[in-house]
Amino acid sequence: MLRHAAELAIRRPRTVITAWALVLVVGLGLGGAVFGRLGGLGANVPGSESQVTAARLDKLDPSPDTIAGLVTSTTAGRVITADTGLRSRVAAAVADLRAIPGVTQVPDPYQTPGATGDGQVVAIPVTFASGISSHAEGVASRAAQDRLHAIATPDFQVRVGGGPLVGDALNQTAQSDASQAEMISLPIVLLLLVVVFGGLLAASLPLVLALCGVASTLLVLYGFSFATDLSVYSVQITTMLGLGLGVDYALLMVTRFKQERTATPDIADCVRRTVSAAGRTVFFSGLTVAVSLVGLVVYPAPFLRSMGLAATAVVAVDMLAAVTLLPALLAKFGHRIKPASPRRSEGRWFGRFAAGVVRRPLPVLIVIAAGLVTIATPVTALTLTPGDARELPASSESRQVYDLSVAHFPGRSAATPLDVWVQNGATRPDYLAHLRALPGVVDSAQKALPDGSAVLELTPAGTVNGKVATGLVQTIRDEHQGASVTGDSAHLVDFRRMLVDRLPYATGVVLLSVFVLLFLFTGSVLIPLKAVLTNLLSIGAALGAMVWVFQQGHFAGLFGSGVKGGLGALDVTVPPLMIAVAFGLSMDYEIFILGRIREARLAGEDARRAVVTGVRHTGRVVTCAAALLMIVFACFMTGGAAPILEFGFGLTLAVLIDATLVRMMLVPAVLALLGEGAWWAPKVLRGVHARFGVAEAPEPASEGMLQQV
């Protein structure tokens, strides 16, 4: 396959470039429509008790949406409930709000107990009719927001939030964060690529590859959107991975091309040799990263499944572009790219560093492993949350409404209510009373339904992800009295259970696939095991740091006032997604280095010397690729949505740890300790590898070498 790709690129570069240009235009045009087909999804699990119960209640007794306007004084600490001018403005607004089509209830806050909290705020909830179309509710919601904002004067401020506005704000923030990150990262990456390659043309190739990858993946996601729900964050993952991996693959290919130019004046031959060596590495790296991410598809949660589809698609497209578009660009414009300087090609510094590690592998292994385990320690305190308005930046109006509610209504629970559906509840008053009296319930409301069942709204103490709320869910379910529970806390419980139940399958799919691909690439059964263990160390350290910063609050203020002091938990969707992506990226760099080590072994070097040679030739590429990828991920921390901050921070740190401590120190130390044993395989598997395996060629000078793939 690679042989045909290389020959097509050499003979018909314009055709290949034109085809990808068409993909770019169509992807940015038609694929851009995917933004209108995205949703929040969150921690919902199809078929779970919480999801089934929610669907049942939506049919029997649709819950109306409610937004709220909070009126506060522009003077801190001022009691505003006695202000007659404000009272008349609020009364006029309440009357106007009640007249808006689609609005069913607007209570007078001055006649509603608790609506003025500690006296420094006036809350005006607006409830819409249940069952109306989303368009009609949107029109009513915008009219209600405009009328609430009109209450404001120089002395009083109005903020509107709650209900569906929180989800809308999260979606809008996610999309604006992605656009902002792209605007910041692209010029920085281009500047650094110019420095790395020493020329604008060579530096532009990785960005062309990355943009084609992102555009074509948007097109793929648009197609996916007709078959499955897609999360709004799937576009951000696509953008991050598309830019990062596109740059990674192009950096490896262009660097190898520049090195080949030092010894081979013929451009066509340079392209062949580049595709034969670096192209094969990119091909297997892309496959390995893709199968690392496809494990997310095993989970039934739409969020994780859409993330798995998006991430796998962008990896596959980037890999395809790297072995087709990039060779065509090199064949067409490669004569304008300067050969690599001898000093950079030799990689002396990385060679000396690797030689030092190989001379003292055991101390290096002990120190690095112990350090990573220590950094990973906070993982034991990991807590998950289904997410709420606290995930928005402090500047968001919905976040401000949440913060004001917590500050001025101290007796109100931070947890959202649990909806308990009781079969034949109308004839079971004793059981309903028992539910209302359960420990931890601070408020309750009861409603009979037309089918003879009843729904009980229980408000637990504490937070949504607290032990009280989740404990109530488990208690009611364990009693087996014909009651089923839904609500945010119940969704969280079901999502956690789904993660635990499906983890063996997802892990099995990923590990088996990675083992097979790495075995075919190296012919060893120990190297795949080593790769998995070292990857877990770097991922564990990154996850531990995420918990330490965003959950426990250490230095969290550096990432914005919205997360200052910590959030008390990580978003439930972030850890599984971060682990999958970080594992895939770790395998990316693993194969970059293993490819060159394998070449050195085929050239006759012993195991230890081959390690030094491999690091010497790839150290600069891996370091530069990691630095550029870190910039892409770090730019996503310039936004305000907490899940994106957590994800960007975790991946930035995971790449930093993996490309430095793990790839440059831990991996060479382990391979040096294992020596020739690192490349061992049972006799029967050696036969399998001899027949089906693929190895880097020490001197890929002819097309025959390309026929191995």
Image (tube, grey):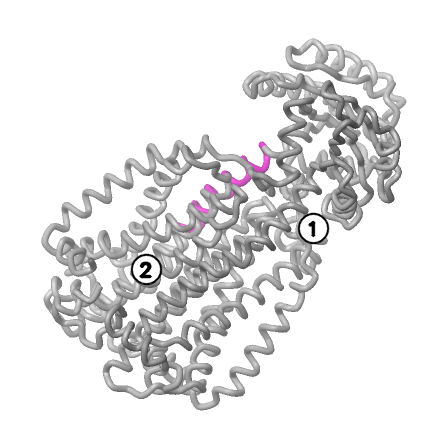
* Amino acid type of the residue tagged 2 in the rendering: Tyr
> What secondary structure is marked by label 2?
helix
Image location of residue 599, percent across then percent down: 27, 77
Q: CA distance from mark 2 to mark 1?
A: 36 Å
The circle on residue 249 is 2
The residue where tag 1 is placed is 567
Left or right of 503 in this view: 1: left
Boundaries of the magenta span: 168-186
* Amino acid type of the residue tagged 1 in the rendering: Leu
> What secondary structure is marked by label 1?
loop
Badge 2 crowding class, 10 Å Cα cut-off, few under 14, some 14 to 19, many 20 or more, is many
Can residue 497 be seen by looking at this rendering?
A: yes
Image location of residue 574, percent across then percent down: 57, 51
Residue 112's place in the image compared with 473, above or below, is: above
Image quadrant where one finds the N terminus: bottom left
Q: Nearer the viewer, residue 242 or 259?
A: 242
Left or right of 446 in this view: 157: left
Residue 400 included in the magenta stretch of the image: no
Image location of residue 634, percent across then percent down: 50, 55
